[in-house]
């Protein structure tokens, strides 16, 4: 507290007292992070609006070029204009909150100027603490300044622990922080964040050096894109944005050079920015359940990537640059529209698990045989007619599923995949009629499913499958062995085949022996007859 200055009139003291009261009664002031967030949102909203309008223009041009008949042109004009209006209205709504924050801050600064003017008037000599009093009443300008300092201290103390286990409130009075800051900081299970709140959280997280940020299911449905300030999260190593309605990522996401884990599943992403390939430290990437139709060419620069989930998208092809992912161990691309795999897949030599179920694949490239570390390969529900001859090179393969396809034959060299434990060739229906003759060489095989095929006879080598524990042949017209034996279980079936082959070999040996003596007697009989020696004794 500065030394007391000269006293003034009661009117002056009353004016200062009212000024102090007015300042104390002001609504919560936006935090610094909120102001920065609002500016970022406005910039992002403008860029996003422009990008959406450009995309609509491209779609409109393409639709008009392909149009033949159909709806009247005038009606289509109305439709495209309605789409543009929708984009503009949504952008306006998203800018509204940010503009309000900036306007609020502008007015607070005007009030700050008024306080400073009052301070100069009360302290003409430059003193910062003029004290004005009359009677027992006193008003100190330091007290006015202290109000603002207290508010700033409280704002700085407000944690932004969203998604990191904090579920309690801030313990502040209702007007200690702004409602936007409070919403971004509470992080309760039921609370959803708007765009400005997300931007504010990004700003505060960036300043604190946050390394893990979890926004799973935390964004309101209206948040369809993220602000460019996302690129400020330089220290983040794990980022979870899953289970929201995000349609686009800002190009600044490429600035997250230390990011090792990114979860974007269950959003509405249509594409990824070209800068996505700059995430050079990324190890785990989950993109399942989006609307991706393609991947950027920069995707091949994600050379640290080990786990990639692309399932439940709209991908028709995988880029050739996929072959650059030398450290990729797990690739899940189920439930897409893939018609083929790039030949470069053979360069992903670290692959251990490859799941391609529910696609439109007609064949696998021969390069698949180069995946020497592959243990799991699933191709359930495709249109594959045959397996590549290089399938036998997969010496570490433990599980192979080609069920619900159009497979006609299984190459004999599959039996070189001696580590195979589980083989499912079921439901190839009228196409598959036989198993490889040398299937018995798969000595590690424990599960085999040949249901709903046209196989009638099991190979003789089947009896060598000593570890077989599970065997399914539902709706397969097996004749050898008979169905009664199949019902007894896998081991009984193996023993039956082994005994059947052994009995046949004994019978064959006896037949061969009798045939030899018959031939010899016949030969000797012809000789005796020619020499006139009489009949050959039986």
Image (cartoon, grey):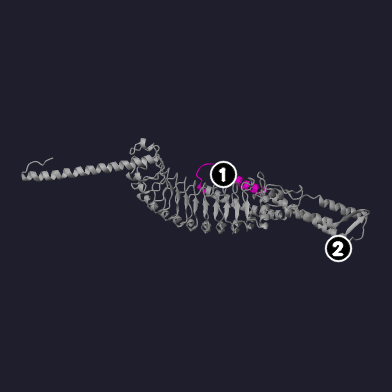
| Image coords of residue 164 (percent x, y) | 64, 50
- The disc at residue 127 is 2
| Quarter of the image where one finds residue 450 | top left
Q: Tell me the SS state at disc 1.
A: helix
Magenta residues?
64-93
Residue 535 position by quadrant: top left
Label tally: 2
Q: Is residue 247 left or right of residue 417?
A: right
Q: Position of residue 118 (x, y in %)?
A: 85, 58
The C terminus lies in which quarter of the figure?
top left
Q: For residue 492, which quarter of the picture?
A: top left
Horizontally, residue 470 falls left or right of residue 240, namely: left
Question: Which quadrant is home to the N terminus?
Answer: bottom right
Residue on which the image places disc 1: 76
Chief secondary structure of the magenta span?
A: helix
Q: Is residue 521 magenta?
A: no
**Left or right: 13 as drawn, with respect to 57:** right
Residue 114 visible in image: no
How crowded pointer 1 is (Cα within 10 Å; few <14, some 14-19, many 20+) is rated as some
Residue 201 vs residue 416, the one in the foreground: 416
Tell me which residue sits at (77%, 53%) in the image: 151
Q: Position of residue 380 (x, y in %)?
A: 45, 45
Query: Which residue appears farthest toward the left when viewing the image?
Result: 532
User: Foreground residue, 343 or 448?
Assistant: 448
Disc 1/disc 2 C-alpha distance (Å): 71 Å
Disc 2: CA contacts within 10 A as few (<14), some (14-19) or many (>=20)? few
Determine the secondary structure under disc 2: loop
Is residue 126 rendered to the left or right of residue 405? Answer: right
């Amino acid at each position: 507290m500065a030394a007391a200055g000269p006293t003034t009139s009661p009117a002056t003291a009353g004016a200062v007292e009212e000024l102090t009261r007015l300042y104390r009664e002001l609504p919560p002031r936006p935090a610094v992070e909120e102001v920065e967030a609002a500016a970022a949102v406005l910039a992002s909203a403008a860029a996003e609006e422009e990008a959406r309008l450009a995309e609509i223009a491209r779609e409109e041009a393409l639709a008009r070029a392909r149009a033949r008949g159909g709806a009247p042109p005038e009606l289509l004009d109305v439709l495209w204009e309605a789409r543009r209006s929708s984009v503009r209205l949504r952008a306006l709504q998203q800018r509204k909150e940010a503009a309000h924050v900036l306007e609020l801050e502008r007015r607070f600064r005007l009030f700050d100027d008024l306080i400073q003017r009052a301070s100069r008037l009360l302290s003409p000599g430059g003193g910062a603490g003029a004290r004005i009093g009359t009677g027992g009443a006193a008003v100190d300008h330091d007290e006015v300044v202290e109000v603002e300092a207290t508010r700033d201290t409280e704002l700085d103390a407000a944690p932004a622990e969203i998604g990191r286990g904090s579920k309690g409130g801030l313990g502040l009075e209702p007007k200690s922080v702004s409602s936007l800051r409070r919403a971004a900081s509470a992080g309760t299970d039921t609370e959803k964040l708007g765009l400005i709140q997300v931007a504010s959280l990004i700003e505060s997280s960036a300043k604190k050096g946050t390394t893990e940020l979890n926004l799973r299911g935390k964004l309101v449905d209206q948040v369809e894109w993220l602000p460019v300030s996302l690129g400020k999260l330089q220290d983040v190593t794990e980022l979870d944005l899953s289970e929201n309605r995000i349609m686009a990522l800002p190009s600044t996401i490429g600035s997250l050079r230390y990011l090792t884990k990114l979860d974007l599943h269950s959003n509405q992403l249509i594409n990824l920015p070209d800068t996505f390939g700059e995430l050079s430290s990324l190890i785990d990437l989950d993109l399942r359940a989006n609307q991706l139709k393609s991947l950027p060419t920069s995707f091949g620069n994600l050379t640290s990537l080990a786990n990639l989930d692309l399932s439940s998208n709209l991908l028709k092809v995988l880029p050739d640059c996929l072959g650059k992912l030398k450290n990729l161990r797990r690739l899940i691309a189920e439930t897409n529209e893939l018609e083929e795999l790039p030949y470069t897949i053979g360069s992903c030599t670290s692959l251990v698990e490859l799941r391609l179920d529910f696609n439109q694949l007609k064949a696998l490239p021969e390069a698949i045989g180069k995946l020497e570390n592959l243990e799991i390969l699933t191709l359930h529900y495709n249109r594959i007619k045959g397996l590549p001859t290089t399938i036998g090179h997969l010496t570490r393969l433990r599980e192979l599923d080609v069920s619900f396809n159009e497979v006609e034959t299984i190459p004999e060299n599959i039996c070189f995949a001696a580590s195979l434990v589980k083989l499912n060739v079921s439901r190839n229906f009228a196409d598959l009629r036989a198993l490889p003759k040398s299937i018995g060489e798969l000595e590690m095989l424990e599960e085999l499913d040949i249901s709903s095929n046209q196989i009638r006879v099991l190979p003789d080598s089947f009896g060598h499958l000593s570890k077989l524990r599970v065997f399914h042949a539902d709706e397969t017209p097996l004749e050898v062995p008979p169905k009664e034996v199949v019902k007894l279980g896998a081991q009984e079936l193996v023993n039956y085949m082994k005994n059947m082959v052994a009995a046949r070999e004994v019978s064959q040996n006896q037949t061969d022996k009798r045939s030899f003596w018959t031939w010899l007697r016949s030969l000797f009989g012809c000789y005796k007859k020619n020499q006139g020696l009489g009949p050959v004794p039986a």
